Amino acid sequence: MKHTLLFTMLAGTALAFTIAAAPVHADDASKNKQTVMYPNATRAEPKLDLTDPKEQKALNEGLDAVNSGDKAKAQQILQPIVDSSKSKYAQAIALQGLANVTYNAGDVKGAIPLLQRAIDDGVMPNDTYYQLMFELAQLYAADSQFQASLDTIAKWRAEGKLETADSYGLAGMDYYRLEKYPEAIAAIQKAKSLTDKPKDSWNQVLMASYAESGKGGDASKMAVDEYEKNPTDSSMLHNASAILLQQQDYANAIKVLEEGRSNGALKDEADWVNLVKAYLLQAQNGGDTKTGSTKALAAFDDGVAKGAIKPSAANYKLAGDAASIGDDDAKAISYYQKGAPLATDGELDVALGRMYFQDQKFSDARKYLTQGISKGVQHKGRAYMMLAESDRQLKDKPGAMAAMKQAAQDPETADKAQEWLNKAAAGK
């Protein structure tokens, strides 16, 4: 199952899908052999059947409308060609144009059958035929039909007798989405071997596939290597830190993010927040809690001052938690108080109640615990137990009993709450 961090990183990766309308010229059948893209294709070149100069002119006008983004004009010209032309070639190229405008309008699913019909007509020159087949594979990928994309790539490669970096890059993405990580790794490595200009998206897929297949060390090394080639690139900074955080390599994640803070590459709010989280996680996993808390809060306050970290319940809770592990109760309370009015639930109110409870300010603890419970919290039983103890400290026995009875209804705290109630009933 994909880790959320990596899945988020890859979710916005754009497919390089472009439909280049095939030119329609009378001399298509007599192309210069040196310009042929698929010289070893198994498919025999068909004889073109477009002979009407008026139809050829109309087709070119329709394709010009496609290229200029005039959807209405393109449809007005091309649809009649699809519906009534006696030329299979003209119909196929018109279908390609309609697939283009449909795709550009955001209807990926609707573009697929149009492009498939264009290919199935079977009358286009090999270069156009195989170009459209590869574009169909891209459309399948864009529509999350990853196996169909892979099947189409395999057909394209077997019949067209051509291997390209882009085809292996696309296959690598498909394999990743199908959670076939070894195959994804092999495909991306092949893609990179065929070009000296690998795409960033390929490296993202490769890093993610390493991580998902248990090769975290390889993922981390690759992430850092890619980042170090251009340490001022914010996207490289994000990728490297995301991989390092997923691999729980907090020290190197902090190193990369701090370098980005120094050189200006640290720009996105998510990366600023990750820097705070990295310090917090390092402190919680064997690090010095005081030092980790101090550095986390320094990064948080710097991000807020620079406008990079925006006011939100989640961000203030993170800062409050960082202050809490450093035993700075006053700061924790301050951050939680700022975040509570922004929250849609009672988690920050309960966090405030916990801080006041620890400081033995039981009246304040009761206030915020009650407030938080009323708004809704995930661990309601724990909140009720703390409320019961606050009431007990305030000599409010009926209140304590009522709160503990509520805790006894939560499976998470039922046993402990019932034990408390039993002792209270026995007068112990």
Image (cartoon, helix red, strand yellow):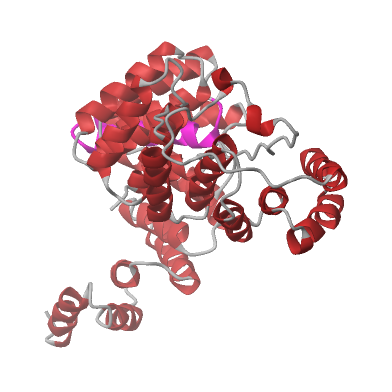
Q: Is residue 269 magenta?
A: yes
Residue 320 in view here: no
Kindly identify the residue that appears in the image at 56 percent across and 34 percent down: 127
Locate residue 339, reporting x and y percent. 53, 50
Instruction: From the image, give the main secondary structure of the stretch colored magenta.
Output: helix
Kindly identify the residue that appears in the image at 47 percent across and 64 percent down: 346
In magenta, the rendered stretch is 267-289
Kindly identify the residue that appears in the image at 47 percent across and 55 percent down: 144
Residue 338 in view here: yes
Kindly identify the residue that appears in the image at 41 percent across and 31 percent down: 162
Q: Is residue 428 above or below residue 104?
A: below
Relative to the observer, which residue lies in front, 29 or 416? 29
Q: Is residue 306 above or below residue 75?
A: above
Whether residue 163 sits left or right of residue 425 in the image: it is right
Relative to the observer, which residue lies in front, 330 or 306? 306
Locate residue 283, reporting x and y percent. 26, 33
Relative to the observer, which residue lies in front, 328 or 342? 342
Give the tally of numbered discs. Answer: 0
